[in-house]
Image (tube, rainbow, N blue to C red):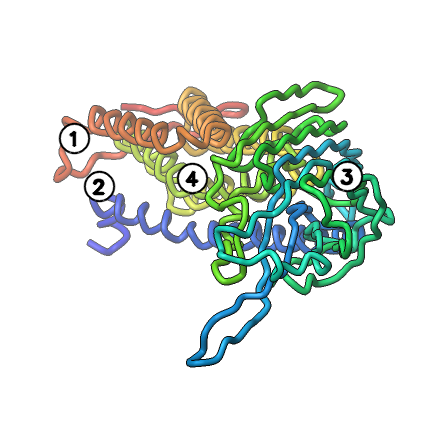
């Protein structure tokens, strides 16, 4: 008996051959994953082109107050001195902003952008150096500087000025001479550090894209944001205490105490606060689309192997139960049709959105496979069963994609149920006895061939 006859008559060898076909179909699956990655990179290039001109994602850190001082120490018999500086955060910080959002396009790709008008105000109490053992005459008050760090300072749209105790002080741009990585805008206070309390206000208009975040630098930090963007995603360690999202936009308010941070209200450059701690404390809002088409496509492709196994298993069960024979090429064509689903979904989602693309792709593939199965399995009922199974699979996949937190649980239960079904239908199968194929009547016009026992 030749190899083909062995495969044809041995259920075990046939299963091995079907497994080989499933593994072979992983080649287009890998190609699809690479295509998704390429389209994501292309989108990122489009985003970089838009945001580079308009403004990138913004992080507002500050304001903070730098005050240098002289540290004296003994070196042998001599007393030496060097200049250090302390960093002080505001005792009260209030930020109010209005994000006027829009969508910019480059080709088929879109990026949410905004222009926000921020009113930053609050209060500093007079810095206290006693914990560092600094004498009052060694504090260089005339060299104090206030800094507001803006992650993409080139997108600032107004000539911002600091109102410090009712006096206007101009800001300068560039690297601060005190902070190691403090890029943004700075105001030299010179002789403005007389008093016990210092109030400040900073009107700031800045462009940005995709998201905006703030650092809770105040002993109490209050941030209020309003926008016409209708799909916000609130991010960070703290979520808003109050928020309202409707068809006109959103309003959100945060009230954050300093006790929830991992860094103090003041430090010096001898024991600086790690920038990573400050970055970890950021909170704010992402102006994201409700669904990331590429992320959803990438997640859905991961289920292709499972769906191929389930579909081929149903074909094999029909072969076993009805003694039909499905040619390996027919298995292969069904597998290619199922792989086309992911390509259609990816291509259509770039123009129609994920939900519409998913629906159209599902209908197209289910109709194609169902019609083909009617011809391959020689009966409309069998083809309809395959079609119903395809509808169930793609409905199940959509539910899994929409509920990421429960995807592992749902997948595990689905696999267990399917294994139980396979074990039930094959419980009395004689794996050693090759089945005898049924004889088929000639195909009649307008109908599928019928079986004769």
Tag 4 secondary structure: loop
Given contact means CB atoms under 8 Å apart, are the residues at marks 2 and 3 in contact?
Answer: no
Q: Quadrant of the C terminus?
A: top left
Q: Quadrant of the N terminus?
A: bottom left
Q: Is residue 1 above or below residue 313?
A: below
Q: Residue at x 41, y 22 (%)?
A: 385
In this view, the residue in front, 174 or 27, is 174
Separation of marks 4 and 3 at Cα, in angstroms: 54 Å
Pointer 2 local density, CA inside 10 Å: few below 14, some 14–19, many at least 20: many
Q: Is residue 446 above or below residue 279?
A: above
Separation of marks 1 and 2 at Cα, in angstroms: 10 Å
In this view, the residue in front, 106 or 352, is 106
Q: Which is nearer the N-term, disc 4 or disc 3?
A: 3
Q: Is residue 3 above or below residue 380?
A: below
Pointer 3 residue: 201
Pointer 2 residue: 11
Pointer 3 local density, CA inside 10 Å: few below 14, some 14–19, many at least 20: many
Lateral position of residue 242 relative to residue 325, left or right: right
Q: Residue at x 45, y 55 (%)?
A: 27
Q: Position of residue 234 (x, y in %)?
A: 59, 32
Q: Which mark is residue 429?
A: 1
Tag 2 secondary structure: helix
Lateral position of residue 416 relative to residue 351, left or right: left
Pointer 4 residue: 303
Lateral position of residue 177 relative to residue 259, left or right: right
């Amino acid at each position: 008996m030749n190899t083909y006859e062995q495969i044809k008559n041995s259920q075990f060898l046939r299963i091995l051959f079907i497994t080989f076909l499933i593994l072979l179909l992983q080649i287009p699956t890998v190609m699809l994953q690479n295509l998704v990655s390429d389209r994501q990179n292309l989108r990122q290039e489009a985003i970089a082109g838009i945001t580079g001109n308009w403004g990138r994602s913004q992080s507002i850190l500050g304001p903070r107050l730098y005050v240098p001082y002289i540290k004296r120490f003994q070196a042998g018999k001599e007393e030496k001195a060097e200049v250090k500086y302390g960093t002080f955060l505001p005792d009260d910080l209030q930020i109010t902003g209005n994000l006027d959002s829009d969508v910019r396009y480059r080709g088929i790709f879109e990026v949410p952008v905004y222009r926000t008008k921020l009113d930053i105000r609050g209060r500093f109490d007079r810095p206290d150096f006693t914990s560092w053992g600094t004498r009052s005459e060694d504090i260089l008050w005339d060299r104090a500087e206030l800094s507001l760090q803006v992650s993409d300072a080139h997108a600032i749209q107004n000539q911002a000025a600091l109102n410090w105790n009712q006096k206007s002080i101009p800001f300068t741009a560039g690297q601060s001479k005190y902070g190691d990585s403090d890029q943004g805008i700075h105001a030299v206070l010179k002789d403005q550090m007389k008093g016990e309390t210092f109030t400040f206000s900073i009107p700031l208009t800045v462009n940005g894209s995709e998201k905006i975040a703030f650092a809770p630098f105040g002993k109490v930090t209050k941030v209020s944001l309003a926008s016409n963007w209708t799909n916000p995603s609130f991010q960070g360690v703290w979520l808003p205490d109050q928020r309202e999202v409707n068809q006109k936009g959103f309003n959100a308010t945060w009230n954050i105490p300093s006790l929830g941070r991992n860094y103090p209200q003041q430090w010096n450059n001898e024991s600086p606060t790690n920038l990573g701690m400050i970055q970890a404390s950021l909170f704010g809002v992402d102006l994201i689309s409700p669904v990331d088409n590429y992320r959803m496509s990438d997640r859905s492709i991961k289920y292709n192997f499972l769906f191929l196994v389930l579909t081929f298993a149903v074909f094999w069960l029909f072969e076993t139960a009805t003694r039909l024979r499905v040619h390996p090429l027919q298995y292969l064509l069904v597998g290619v049709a199922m792989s086309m689903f992911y390509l259609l979904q990816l291509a259509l989602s770039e123009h129609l959105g994920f939900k519409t693309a998913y629906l159209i792709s599902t209908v197209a593939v289910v109709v194609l496979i169902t019609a083909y199965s009617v011809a391959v399995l020689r009966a409309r009922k069998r083809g309809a069963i395959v079609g119903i199974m395809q509808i169930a699979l793609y409905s199940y996949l959509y539910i899994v994609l929409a509920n990421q937190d429960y995807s592992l649980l749902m997948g595990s239960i689905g696999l267990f149920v399917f294994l139980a079904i396979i074990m039930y239908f094959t419980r009395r199968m004689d794996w050693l006895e090759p089945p005898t194929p049924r004889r088929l009547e000639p195909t009649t016009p307008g109908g599928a061939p019928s079986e004769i026992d």
